[in-house]
Amino acid sequence: MTKKLKLEALNRVDLETFRLLKKNPITLVLDNIRSMHNVGAFFRTADAFLVEKILLTGITPRPPHREIHKAALGATESVEWSYSENIVSALECLKRENYKILGIEQATRSVFLQKYVISADQKYALVFGNEVEGISENALEFCDGCIEIAQSGTKHSLNVSVCGGIVMWEFYKAFSF
């Protein structure tokens, strides 16, 4: 019979050990995300997949906040993060640090996630946009390319934090397995 594992059996590391772990060279850039629940979900998923850091920009809410904490479950303490009011300044800085900037967006010349070749020798900045408007035009200008997730239903998009989870998982697999 299959039984659920108890938390102790999962062998998770403590916060101090986690901070010392080698992270995947991925920076998430949240471009004007409105929902605190989405922000919290990004933190929690970033923790799970050893994302290097999260960069919050524009109107994106910042920790500490009760609503972010509800979804993050403490990941705002384990995942490195910073805030920049201006997305252009943030992306210029990432370019200087040799990040390949990829917009996660339905755009002309976007590549489907399952076809995108992730290089283990590259640092990536993955830009996720506002729940309604997507990635801002200012941010899109700095993207080296765009990735989109193939969909077959009647809706035009996925929830941004769900999208983040799918993309982070693909990058995690490329760096970790």
Image (cartoon, rainbow, N blue to C red):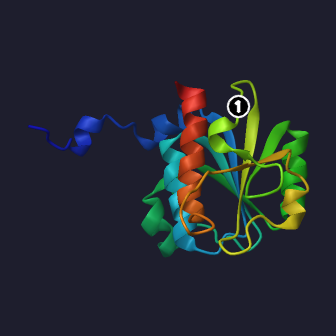
Q: Measuring from the top left, give residue 31's x and y in whole percent.
A: 74, 64
Q: Quadrant of the N terminus?
A: top left
Q: Measuring from the top left, give residue 114's x and y in whole percent.
A: 62, 39
Q: State the residue in front, 166 or 63.
A: 166
**What SS does tag 1 mark?**
loop
Tag 1: amino acid: Val
Identified at 59% across, 54% down, the residue is 164
Q: Measuring from the top left, give residue 142's x and y in whole percent.
A: 89, 52
Identified at 57% across, 39% down, the residue is 170
Q: Look at mark 1 in the image and give the residue it sits on.
A: 117
Q: Measuring from the top left, give residue 44's x and y in whole percent.
A: 49, 54
Q: Is residue 92 above or below residue 118?
A: below
Q: State the residue in front, 88 or 154.
A: 154
Displayed quadrant of residue 82: bottom right
Q: Is residue 78 visible?
A: no
Identified at 62% across, 34% down, the residue is 24
